[in-house]
Amino acid sequence: MVNAQLHGQLAIERTLAKTLWGLVTWVQAKLTAHTIGVYLNLL
């Protein structure tokens, strides 16, 4: 379920990061946004 949401809603497979740090930052931002969304939905 979580993997499907990350794939479909957040487009986790598409990135334009040029460096490893850019990729890490991008993925962290996407996962944080997803986690906050799930948490808010539970409230």
Image: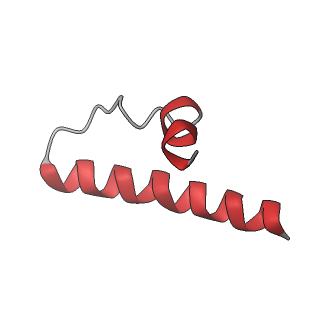
Location of residue 34 in the rendering, given as x and y in whole percent from the top left corner: 58, 54
Location of residue 9 in the rendering, given as x and y in whole percent from the top left corner: 59, 34
In percent of the image, x 65 and y 64: which residue is there? 36
Q: Tell me: residue 11, above or below residue 24.
A: above
Q: Tell me: residue 22, above or below residue 36.
A: above
Give the camera-side residue of 4 and 14. Answer: 4
Number of labelled discs? Answer: 0
In percent of the image, x 52 and y 62: which residue is there? 32
Location of residue 15 in the rendering, given as x and y in whole percent from the top left corner: 32, 33
Location of residue 25 in the rendering, given as x and y in whole percent from the top left corner: 32, 57
Quadrant in the picture for the N terminus: top right
- Work out which residue is located at the far right of the displayed protein and give it: 43
Colour theme? secondary structure
In percent of the image, x 69 and y 60: which residue is there? 38
Give the camera-side residue of 38 and 28. Answer: 38
Examine the image and state in which quarter residue 40 appears. Answer: bottom right
- Work out which residue is located at the far left of the displayed protein and give it: 19
In percent of the image, x 14 and y 51: which residue is there? 20
Quadrant in the picture for the C terminus: bottom right
Give the camera-side residue of 16 and 42. Answer: 42
Tell me: 18 left or right of 3.
left
Q: Tell me: residue 24, above or below residue 5.
A: below
